[in-house]
Image (tube, grey):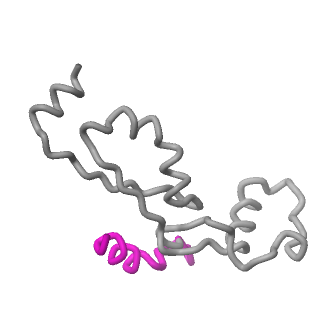
Amino acid sequence: KYVNIMATLNPRRLRVLCLHGYKQYDEHFKHRTNALQKALKKMIDLHYISAPHRVRYNVHLAEQQKLKPNEAKPDEKKVIDSEFLPRARAWWDSQESNGIHTYVGLAETIKYIASF
């Protein structure tokens, strides 16, 4: 009943920009939020976009090694068929050097989102 009351009070639908997580992409996130879409379909329009940056295999493998340091490192030549993970996207690349974090590609991402 609450959803119906809100829809009648404000006939203009709210537009919500949905940003996926690291190593995901728009269609994957859309699928994961399907129940939310259905529950709020009378009130909001959800808009999904994919991040502008692709995720490199070597970055992915290094992250996996940090998460599971006791596991044997995979043979990169056998694992890598491409330079990038298929479909995996990122909003920026976080890098750390001497305790200082930088976010490579963040300015590009902000421009990209603003143009949507």
Q: Position of residue 66 (x, y in %)?
A: 72, 60
Q: Position of residue 20 (x, y in %)?
A: 47, 56
Task: Give the residue at x 53% y 73%.
Answer: 93
**Depth check, front residue: 95 or 51:** 51
Task: Give the residue at x 17% y 33%.
Answer: 7
The correct choice, above or below, for 24 with respect to 13 in the image is below
In the rendered image, the quadrant that contains the C terminus is bottom left
The correct choice, above or below, for 22 with respect to 82 in the image is above
Q: Position of residue 4 (x, y in %)?
A: 20, 26
Q: Is residue 100 magenta?
A: yes
Task: Give the residue at x 73% y 68%.
Answer: 62
Q: Is residue 80 magenta?
A: no
In the rendered image, the quadrant that contains the N terminus is top left
**Depth check, front residue: 58 or 70:** 58
The correct choice, above or below, for 53 with respect to 5 in the image is below
Magenta segment range? 94-116
Q: Position of residue 77 (x, y in %)?
A: 88, 76
Which image quadrant for residue 97? bottom right
